[in-house]
Image (spheres, helix red, strand yellow):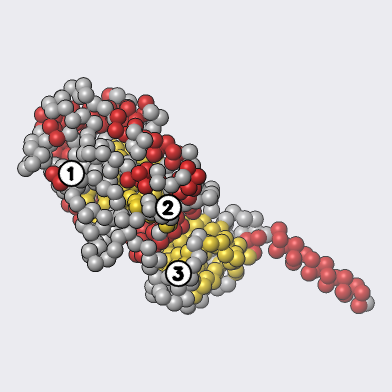
Amino acid sequence: MDSRRIHATALRLILFILGSSLMFPGFSQEVTVYVTSKAGDRLASKPPLHFVEKAARPEPGFRVDDATTYQKIDGFGASFLEAGPICLQSLDDSAQEAVLRAVFNAHQGAGFSAMKTVIGATDFQSAGPYYTYDDMPGDLKLLHFSIARDLQPAGLIPYIKRARQHGSFVLQAPMDYPPDWMLFDVQKNQDVNPRALPALARYYLYYLRNYKKHGISIEYLSPFNEPGIYTKIPAEKIRDLIRNYVGPLFTKEGVETKIQVCDFANRGDAATNLPVILDDPAARKYVRSISYHGYEFKDYNKIAALHERYPDLPFWMTEVDHSYGTDTPRSQPLPRYDYEDGDFWGAQIFSDLEAGASAWIYWNLILDEKGGPYLLSEEHRDGPDNFQHPVIIVNRRTKEVTYTALYYYLAHFSKFVRPGAYRIRTEGAVAGVRCIVFKTPAGGMVAEVLNSQPRQVKTELHWRGKLLEMTLPPLSITTGLWNPTDRGDSTR
């Protein structure tokens, strides 16, 4: 064979190899990367990485098993409260829409997909005095029921409708207190009087119907917010309310809204009270989801145990924040502008998801530079100095908008881990680093990698016999996206 034929044969072989690589992208699986870091990245697009065909090595890393799935994801978000539109109204129209777009648009913003609203007054229903939807004493027939407050310019209904112009989300609604006349005594015994239970069930029904008349569907209703702290109603009476009144009434009236078990104040309260309700088959048949709050920042194992006990019910973490009444000493200014706070919230999200949560919802979406405004009604536990930390800070004086570190860490989940995704099995241990992986409804993969170390860390992901090398910036969260169904992925 002469040299020309040898060169031609070699050239054909090279072209075949190159062509095969182009035809079969799974040969070097591409991973799209987004990073938020202390160095200044904010959901920043980075050069793609690649899974390559390499044997697993003994270096610390994470192993992804997409054949094993866990909970289905319902969404991520925060809460609609009157404090939000009050702050937004200090901005011009275009700036207001820019904020809402940054929160709810899944392409140009964070794409929040699960939001909380409230049934009547709570501490950040700040556009007026304390209220319920029927403040007429003794009105058991609810002849004076009205949602007029929620229709005002700073009300919840215009706020929700504006948000829905930028994206889609489901709504969850709990209630701090029913009308005072449904209680034994608002000053001393704030438990619900049993004779008011039928009226209370209709109160929920009227709330849902009136919102529906104004074009807003509430997908999940939670009868009480932090029972025992606000309404002093025991778990046994909540069980009876669901079993004997709310459940049968909703069934009779064809209500599509799903009933959640009440938003217990923390994971420990949920572990104590949920079995009282859910172990009664007559009550449990009406419950479609479980909601709890993340205060005290511990006891994730109790949620994991509850998830094993009630595997058919999605678990939602529906409220948590920084406030002087929870985790923040008064020496720490609120709201917080420091980047490091994002890592704190990233760890909370990871822990709840690993425990089995299907949704993760923060408390205040928008507050001002002072951490307000808030409502005062001390007999309803809405006291003074109630400054808190939001997802977004609007300085009503300077008109500056600050997207907090919490916003960016939460956005890594809400933007990329869309409703319908499933958490999949991920194992491994790297000091100061956590990894959690999801399979999307379209079959794609999303890895979230949290580096809590103040230094750069190199780690690896092992998946289907392939290896991805990652260099994580100090104090960062990294999202990696890839499509396992690319042609040429011989392991599928």
Q: Quadrant of the C terminus?
A: bottom right
Disc 2 versus disc 3: nearer the observer? 2
| Local SS, label 1 | loop
Residue picked out by circle 2? 399
**Residue drawn at 47 percent across, 76 percent down:** 456
Mark identifier at residue 135:
none
Mark identifier at residue 38:
3
Q: Amino acid at mark 2?
A: Lys
Return the x and y of residue 292 as percentages of the image width and height: 26, 49
**Residue drawn at 26 percent across, 57 percent down:** 323
In the rendered structure, are the residues bearing label 1 and label 2 in contact, judged by CB atoms less than 8 Å apart? no
Q: Quadrant of the N terminus?
A: bottom right
**Residue drawn at 24 percent across, 45 percent down:** 375
Disc 1 versus disc 2: nearer the observer? 2
Instruction: Give neighbour class at mark 1: few <14, some 14-19, many 20+ (Cα, 10 Å).
Output: some
Return the x and y of residue 161 as percentages of the image width and height: 42, 36
Taking 23 as reference, is 184 left or right? left
Return the x and y of residue 178 as percentages of the image width and height: 19, 36
| Local SS, label 2 | loop
**Residue drawn at 53 percent across, 50 percent down:** 108
- Can residue 267 be seen at all in this image of the molecule? no
Q: Amino acid at mark 3?
A: Lys
N-term-proximal mark, 2 vs 3? 3
N-term-proximal mark, 1 vs 3? 3
Seen from the viewer's position, the closer of residues 55 and 223 is: 223
Report the Cα–Cα distance between label 2 and label 3. 25 Å
Q: Amino acid at mark 1?
A: Ser
| Local SS, label 3 | loop
Q: Quadrant of residue 176?
A: top left
Residue picked out by circle 1? 377
Seen from the viewer's position, the closer of residues 302 and 53 is: 302
